[in-house]
Image (tube, rainbow, N blue to C red):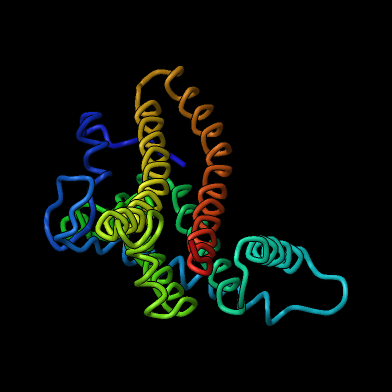
């Protein structure tokens, strides 16, 4: 959601200001792996802790009788994720299905932070006198490529772990050099498989980042529309903000679902031989 930006900033300065991170160094680029974005880490942990709390409350208050709305909703999500895991992963799913559920809820909660007003924290920091200490702050971890790449690297580790676990060290290494063209083209096979692992990881991170970054940018543009000193600008701000917020609900959930599905697909592929 949006609120009107400060009149002290030009539109370009306003957008640039809101795309900056509270980090260990000044950041002027979209992604810089040499620094640590403290806001991304904080809100990622916050969303993860909130997801754990919600699941704990759902499990604690679960009853065998007619479920309440919250329990029914959680049961629907759990059943949906479990059905997807059954259809994709052929093997032991005792860890994979809960993993997929964790990924879905975590990413959905991180994406949902995009509904907070874009100027809420800058205004709050100004009220408590922290605006000189925290000059930049971004709330949505999935709109930071550093954040999405970190999650994607975690998925890569799981892909490699299950590849070794299911196929054994010898079987996995043989597959790396023998598939898909045969052992006589081992260098080409190894290069192709390494590129495949890298492409899966990068595309997984870029897909989520691109959609959430674009959504955040649109919220900022809508906020700029509301800053115009005209009745049309204010009405357009309210209408456009409401429409985009409603549509963004679909994007938030869809991106979480896609990320979960791709995680299952990649781990499922680790269970299968070429």
What residue occupies the far front of the structure in this picture?
Answer: 184
The residue positioned 56% from the left and 53% from the top of the image is 257
Report whether 2 appears left or right of 244. left
Q: Nearer the viewer, residue 73 or 96?
A: 96
Question: Residue 36's spot in the image, x, y percent?
Answer: 20, 63
Report whether 242 appears left or right of 74. left
The residue positioned 50% from the left and 28% from the top of the image is 240
Question: Residue 189's spot in the image, x, y percent?
Answer: 32, 57
Asked if residue 89 shows in the view, the reply is: yes
Question: Residue 168's spot in the image, x, y percent?
Answer: 43, 80
The residue positioned 51% from the left and 30% from the top of the image is 238
Report whether 225 appears left or right of 52. left
In this rendering, the answer to whether 170 lies above or below 201 is below
Q: Nearer the viewer, residue 261 or 248?
A: 261
Q: Nearer the viewer, residue 162 or 75?
A: 162
What residue occupies the far left of the structure in this picture?
Answer: 25
Asked if residue 127 shows in the view, the reply is: no
The residue positioned 55% from the left and 63% from the top of the image is 105
**Quarter of the rendering containing residue 39:** bottom left
In this rendering, the answer to whether 240 lies above or below 200 is above
How many marks the image carries: the answer is: 0
**Quarter of the rendering containing residue 97:** bottom right
Question: Residue 248's spot in the image, x, y percent?
Answer: 53, 40
What residue occupies the far right of the structure in this picture?
Answer: 65
């Amino acid at each position: 959601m949006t609120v009107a930006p400060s009149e002290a900033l030009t539109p370009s300065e306003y957008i640039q200001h809101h795309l900056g991170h509270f980090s260990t160094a000044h950041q002027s680029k979209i992604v810089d792996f040499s620094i640590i974005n403290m806001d991304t880490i904080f809100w990622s942990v916050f969303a993860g802790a909130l997801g754990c709390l919600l699941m704990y409350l759902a499990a604690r208050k679960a009853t065998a009788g007619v479920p309440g709305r919250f329990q029914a909703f959680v049961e629907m999500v759990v059943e949906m994720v479990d059905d997807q895991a059954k259809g994709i992963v052929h093997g032991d799913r005792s860890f994979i299905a809960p993993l997929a559920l964790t990924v879905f809820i975590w990413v959905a909660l991180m994406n949902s932070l995009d509904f907070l007003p874009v100027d809420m924290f800058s205004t709050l920091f100004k009220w408590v006198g922290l605006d000189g200490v925290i000059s930049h702050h971004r709330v949505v971890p999935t709109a930071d490529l550093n954040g999405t790449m970190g999650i994607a690297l975690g998925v890569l580790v799981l892909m490699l772990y299950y590849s070794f676990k299911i196929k054994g060290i010898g079987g996995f290494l043989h597959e790396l050099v023998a598939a898909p063209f045969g052992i006589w083209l081992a260098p080409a096979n190894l290069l192709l498989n390494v590129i495949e692992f890298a492409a899966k990881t990068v595309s997984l991170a870029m897909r989520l980042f691109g959609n959430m970054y674009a959504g955040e940018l649109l919220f900022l543009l809508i906020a700029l529309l509301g800053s115009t000193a005209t009745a049309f600008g204010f009405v357009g701000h309210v209408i456009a903000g409401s429409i985009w917020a409603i549509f963004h609900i679909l994007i938030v959930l869809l991106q979480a679902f896609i990320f979960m599905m791709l995680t299952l697909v990649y781990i499922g592929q680790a269970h299968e031989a070429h």
